[in-house]
Image: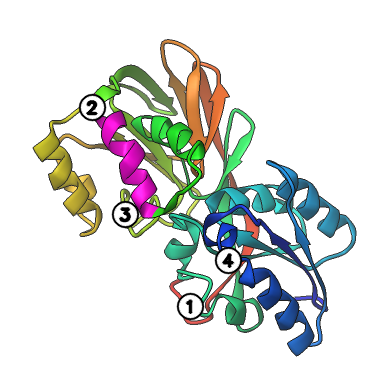
Amino acid sequence: MPPLKVRFIFNPYSGSNRRNPQLHDRAVEFIAQHRLDGTVVSTERPRHATELAAQAVAEGCTLVVAIGGDGTMNEVATALVGTPAVFGLIPCGSGNGLGRHLGIHKAGHGAFRTLLEGRPRAIDTGLVNGFAFFNAMGLGFEADIAVRFSRLTRRGLAGYFRVGVPSFFSHEPEIITVRQPGGTTELKAFTLAVMNSDQYGNDARVAPGAKMDDGRFNLISMPQVGFLGACGMLYRLGTDTFDQVKAVTRLDGAEFVIERSKPGWIHTDGEPRATTAKLEITLKPHSLRIMVPAGGAT
């Protein structure tokens, strides 16, 4: 990499940062300890991290680091796509799907060390109706959870269960048409995800074997099931066998057009977004470089 000029972007409202802002001070210490040309800035509002990351690139930063959860990750990474800057991640959110997939599990598990001792890896970027996603996007039940979760003041894994259980019993499946080069698939989807990585977060691997740099997405659709069936699927999420469930549909491809009956919510990396009934999903191969552990998987 070129000489290191680093910008840390700290989200004080994300995950554990809300209760304990010590990672801000840890970043300041890291810069001083390694005598880096670097600064730490804090977000003040939604989408602010994208503005701060774009400013960092404009000012010649070669490494731009997000300190936050999947939403902060998405905002910072969005500004770095197709730029010379390398993305760094200090994950401290509720799911940390991207970080876990790449071997950066938590802020205290070597994440800071990876910024200097790791290696840059080029990963694919997804776009859905112009919104970038790096780990996953989805609709249906999981988008409903994202909307409910975004309104909580206390989050964490327990928060997913607090919003997920009532949503599971109230959400209705919808008829979805999936078009891709070579074919059309009709689905009655309770939830549907387009995965760039193998998992949502918390090691819930919905697309076992998925890779972030192969120029392909994995589309995973699940129909409505009963409570016992859902419990079985939850078990399979942790055993790399989720896609072996007969009721689960798995498609792969570099682009999809998804058509539903009406506009509604989707999520991009867990962040809810209201958009149109038609979803156009495309892929930018190897468009974001991210620092990963040197000994991690290729």
Position of 207 relative to 297 (above/below): above
Viewer-proximal residue, 155 or 139? 155
- Mark 2 lies on residue: 169
Q: Nearer the viewer, residue 54 or 146?
A: 146
The amino acid at mark 1 is: His
Q: Which of marks 2 and 1 is in front?
A: 2
Inter-mark Cα distance, 1 to 3: 19 Å
Residue designated by label 1: 109
Task: Quickly name the residue at label 4.
Answer: 20
The residues colored magenta run 157-169
Label 4 element class? loop
Q: How is the image coloured?
A: rainbow
Query: In 3D space, how far apart are the residues under numbered discs 4 and 3 (Cα atoms)?
Result: 26 Å
Mark 3 or mark 2, whichever is nearer to me: 2
Q: Which of marks 2 and 1 is nearer the N terminus?
A: 1
Q: Which comes before the other along the chain, label 4 or label 3?
A: 4
State the CA–CA distance, disc 3 to disc 2.
21 Å
Place of residue 272 in the rendered image (x, y in percent of width and height, measured from the top left): 52, 33
- The location of residue 130, given as percent across then percent down, is 64, 31
Q: Mark 3 points at which residue?
A: 204
Pair 1/4: label in front: 4
Above or below, 297 against 201 in this view is below
Residue positioned 51% across, 77% down in the render: 108
